[in-house]
């Protein structure tokens, strides 16, 4: 088992949507990029919804995504896990990201989307009870992981229905 740590959030101050995973997978950690596994559907889905090139360099994708009002982070700051699967995350020794601070710094976030079931379970169990009341909608979306065997188009349709109405260019 290895102790793994997440990344800083990808976010502009005026973000309206926060997408939360549980913890980056092995390839993402090696490359220091969110959703770096080539078969993960996150970037292709977001590119179709937000209108950018999914094959652009990572920095350009991040810029396009954050400019459209989307922030990306993980529920866990640190955990013990072998491999990349959420099911391998040890229940003990989980350290959660500081969401009260994040929401204070990003008061426009009105929608939190969980990229898969483990992110939502962890957030609901350990984070949500610690947050002050806020007007935020929480939605679990189908995981973009290649391990989640749902057809790409089905994932895209669900993601587009939830995120599409909230996207747009942010003020400069």
Image: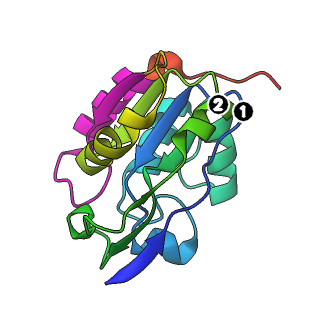
Q: x, y percentage for residue 153? A: 26, 38
Assess disc 2: are there few (<14), some (14-19) or many (≥20) residues with their C-alpha within 10 Å of its C-alpha.
few
**Relative to 71, residue 61 above or below:** below
Q: x, y percentage for residue 5? A: 50, 69
Assign a secondary structure to mark 2: helix
Q: Is residue 47 left or right of residue 162?
A: right
| Residue drawn at point x = 56 percent, y = 33 percent | 51
Residue 170: quarter of image: top right
Assign a secondary structure to mark 1: loop
Q: Which residue position holds label 2?
A: 104
Magenta stretch, residue numbers: 137-163
Residue 13: quarter of image: top right
Q: Is residue 90 left or right of residue 48?
A: left
Q: x, y percentage for residue 124? A: 30, 38
Q: Is residue 150 left or right of residue 37?
A: left
Pointers 2 and 1 in contact (C-beta within 8 Å): no
From the viewer's side, name the closer residue of 117 and 125: 125
Name the N-terminal-most of marks 2 and 1: 1
**Magenta residue check for 35:** no
Q: Which residue position holds label 1?
A: 13
| Residue drawn at point x = 36 percent, y = 27 percent | 138
């Amino acid at each position: 088992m290895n102790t793994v740590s997440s990344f800083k959030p990808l976010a502009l101050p005026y973000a309206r949507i926060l997408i939360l995973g549980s913890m980056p997978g092995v390839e993402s950690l090696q490359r220091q990029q969110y959703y770096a596994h080539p078969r993960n559907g996150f970037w292709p889905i977001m590119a179709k919804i937000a209108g950018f090139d999914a094959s652009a360099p990572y920095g350009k994708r991040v810029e396009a995504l954050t400019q459209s009002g989307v922030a990306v982070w993980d529920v866990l700051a640190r955990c013990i896990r072998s491999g990349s699967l959420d099911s391998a995350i040890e229940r003990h020794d989980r350290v959660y990201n500081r969401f009260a601070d994040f929401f204070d710094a990003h008061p426009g976030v009105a929608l939190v989307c969980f990229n898969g079931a483990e992110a939502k379970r962890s957030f609901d169990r350990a984070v949500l009870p610690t947050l002050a009341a806020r007007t935020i909608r929480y939605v679990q979306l189908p995981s973009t992981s290649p391990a989640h065997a749902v057809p790409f188009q089905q994932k895209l349709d669900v993601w587009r229905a939830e995120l599409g109405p909230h996207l747009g260019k942010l003020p400069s």
